[in-house]
């Protein structure tokens, strides 16, 4: 039985084409994102940013009334830590570079696949989360992730420390020392 993880990370989609809004929204909801908001009018972005405080903005570039680069600039000014993925139906390297220089986290071409969109969203949100934490919290997160990797490797090697040490590129003594620290931390 497959279970879908649910993510309560608010995401805002801005695209003047309702078909793409629906497509992106369905992909994200199927991917487990429960707070997905959208608008086909880029002029509503300031209001929607205040209302939903999204952690990620998916924004089309070419739209009437206000283009996506203008939305990007305004959004970065008012929500500097928010991740932004720019989306365009036009393959233009200069525009992509410009978006990234102005603070976009990623740039996708339309049409895109569900896997590409979900991978980009997960990568951008993870990177954003890690970069927006204070350094001490980041180090603690990294240590826990590393500790979990060590424990999972030992588990995969059926508790064989020598085999685990080889897979991890560590000495047996290093693995034992790390296990001791993990045990002391968890007590």
Image (cartoon, grey):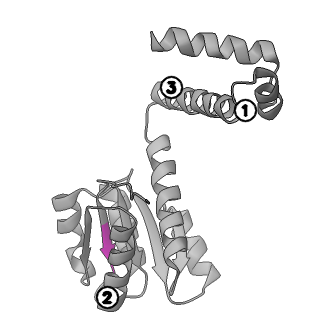
The relative height of residue 127 versus residue 187 in the rendered view (above or below) is below
Q: Quadrant of residue 70?
A: bottom left
Query: Which type of secondary structure does the marked residue at label 2 adopt?
Result: loop
* Residue at x 53%, y 72% (from the top left corner): 115
Query: Which secondary structure class fits the magenta region best?
Result: strand
What percent of the width, then of the height, locates residue 40? 26, 84
What percent of the width, then of the height, locates residue 172? 80, 17
In this rendering, the label closer to the viewer, 2 or 3: 3
The quarter in which the C terminus is drawn is top left
* Residue at x 20%, y 75% (from the top left corner): 44
**Looking at the image, can residue 17 be seen?**
no
Q: CA distance from mark 2 to mark 1?
A: 52 Å
The local crowd at label 2, few if under 14, some if 14 to 19, many if 20 or more residues have their Cα within 10 Å, is: some
- Residue 83 lies left or right of residue 167; in this view the side is left
Label for residue 16?
A: 2
- What residue sits right under mark 3 in the picture? 140
Q: Which residues are magenta?
A: 12-16
| Mark nearer the N terminus (2 vs 3) | 2
- Residue 138 lies left or right of residue 151; in this view the side is left
- What residue sits right under mark 1 in the picture? 157
The relative height of residue 109 versus residue 37 in the rendered view (above or below) is below
Q: Quadrant of residue 34?
A: bottom left
What percent of the width, then of the height, locates residue 35? 25, 62
* Residue at x 60%, y 72% (from the top left corner): 97
């Amino acid at each position: 039985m497959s279970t879908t993880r649910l993510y309560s990370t608010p995401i805002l989609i801005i695209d003047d084409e309702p078909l793409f809004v629906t497509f992106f929204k369905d992909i994200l909801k199927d991917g487990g994102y429960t707070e997905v908001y959208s608008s086909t009018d880029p002029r509503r972005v300031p209001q929607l940013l205040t209302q939903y405080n999204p952690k990620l903005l998916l924004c089309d570039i070419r739209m009437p009334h206000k283009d996506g680069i203008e939305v990007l600039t305004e959004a970065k000014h008012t929500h500097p830590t928010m991740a932004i993925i720019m989306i365009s139906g036009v393959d233009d390297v200069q525009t992509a570079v410009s978006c990234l220089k102005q603070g976009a986290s990623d740039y996708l071409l339309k049409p895109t696949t569900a896997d590409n969109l979900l991978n980009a969203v997960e990568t951008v949100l993870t990177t954003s989360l890690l970069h927006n934490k204070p350094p001490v919290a980041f180090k603690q997160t990294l240590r826990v992730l590393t500790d979990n990797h060590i424990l999972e490797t030992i588990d995969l090697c059926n508790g064989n420390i020598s085999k685990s040490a080889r897979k991890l590129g560590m000495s047996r003594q290093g693995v034992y020392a790390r296990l001791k620290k993990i045990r002391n931390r968890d007590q």
